[in-house]
Amino acid sequence: MRFFIALEIPEENKAQFQAIQASLHTLIPQARLTTPDKIHLTLTFIGEQPDELKDKLTQVLLDAATGIPSFEITPAYIDGFPNIHHPQVLWVGVKDDIDKIFIIHERIQDGLETLHLPTDERRFIPHITIAKLNNQLSFSVDRNLERNLEKIMASNLEPIQVSSIKLFESVADGGLHRHNTLAEIKLGNNILSKNDVSLIQLPHGSSQGTESETPGSN
């Protein structure tokens, strides 16, 4: 399985991301928008590992969630990778309770190291991918376009309630990727137990949506 761990954006918050994307697409029509069912905040991409590792990864998430209450984050700005002036990926950064995201991320990294799994050494930036500019190497964002991107985020945006962490499987399917939820770990308890874990058993071939991007680039 190709595993990754993420915070899923609740359905009630998806509309405002679609509005951001619509405004973005008006400014940058060549951008390929992330589909609504793939809008999430990736904590770490683990990659291809044996299927039987799922239970150990679920335990890593349980440990990471211990003592962390549910919290709120708010969409705040648009940026890009490798940078906003020559982006290949466009994303929304968040504000408010991001300290809890960093704590969860650091605990997950520690857990993966305990399992002798590789971890991403790059600086972690909590972000939600909204579009890609694949094969648009000549594209650049000038100051005027940058100001217009800032205007998109100038309105009051609704906070996002984060109440769980999810373990996902990414399945290649004809050049696309299906993302299946394998486990959901709820936040909000001081001590978590198996009752706080929702293990999702999906029929073979089922998914929570399909897209052509891989979570490693989120």
Image: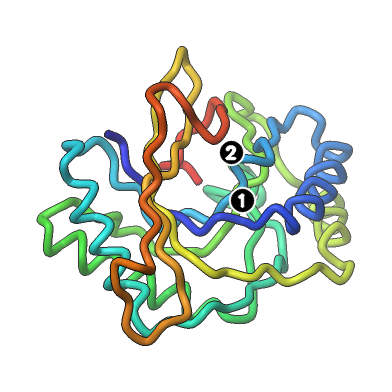
Is residue 47 depicted above or below 146 in this figure? above
Q: Residue at x 47, y 42 (%)?
A: 217
**Three-letter code, disc 2:** Gln
2 or 1: tag closer to the N-terminus: 1
Q: Quadrant of the N terminus?
A: top left
Q: Would you name the residue on which mark 1 appears?
A: 80
Image-based side of 150 in relation to 9, left or right: right
Q: Which mark is residue 118?
A: none
Q: Which mark is residue 88?
A: 2
Please say if the residues under marks 2 and 1 sit with CB atoms less than 8 Å apart: yes
Is residue 5 depicted above or below 212 in this figure? below
Q: Residue at x 88, y 37 (%)?
A: 26
Position in image of residue 165 (x %, y %): 44, 62
Position in image of residue 213 (x %, y %): 52, 31
Q: Residue at x 44, y 18 (%)?
A: 173
Image-based side of 125 in relation to 110, left or right: right
How many C-alpha atoms fall within 10 Å of the one at disc 2: few (<14), some, or many (≥20)? many
Is residue 32 depicted above or below 163 in this figure? above
Q: Residue at x 52, y 64 (%)?
A: 126
